[in-house]
Amino acid sequence: MRRRPEARWRRATADLDVLVGLQRSLLDRALDLTRPGGVVLYATCSPVLAETRDVVQGVLAARADVSLGPIAATAGNVPDSAGPIEGTVQLWPHRHGTDAMFLALLRRTPA
C-alpha cells in the first residue's frame, strides 16, 4: 500500500476469502515439495490476520509433518516486530519503515 496506494481501490472485502484460500494452497504445495528437514519461508505483505496467523495456524493444525521455526534471529531481531504467533515477525510501515510484512519459517519434520 505504501508504494501502490491505489491498490486499496482494486480489492474488495470479499476478495479476502479467495486470497486466503490461494495462499493456503500455495503454502501447502510448497511444503509438499520441500524435502524432510527443509524449510519454507511464508511471507506476505499484509498485516491481515486471516492472511498471516490464520494461514500458518491452519497449516500447522492440518499437517503433522510441519513445525514452526523461530525466524526473529534470522530476520535480524528487529525491535518491536513480534508477530501474531510466537516465533513469527510482523513489520509495520510506521515502526520499521517497510511495507507491512509478515514472516513465518515452516520446517518439514525429518522422516
Image (cartoon, rainbow, N blue to C red):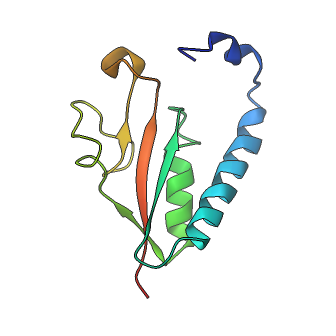
* Location of residue 61 with respect to 82 vertically, above or below: below
* Location of residue 8 with respect to 103 vertically, above or below: above
Seen at 35% across and 41% down, the residue is 89
* Location of residue 96 with respect to 25 vertically, above or below: above
Q: Quadrant of residue 93?
A: top left
Q: Residue farthest to the top?
A: 6
Assign the C terminus to one quadrant of the image: bottom left
Percent coordinates x, y for residue 92 in the rendering = 39, 24
Seen at 42% across and 44% down, the residue is 103
Q: Nearer the viewer, residue 21 or 5?
A: 5
Q: Nearer the viewer, residue 15 or 78?
A: 78
Seen at 71% across and 51% down, the residue is 21
Percent coordinates x, y for residue 19 in the rendering = 71, 42
Percent coordinates x, y for residue 40 in the rendering = 47, 60
Q: Is residue 26 left or right of residue 108?
A: right
Q: Quadrant of residue 59?
A: bottom right
* Location of residue 9 with respect to 78 vertically, above or below: above
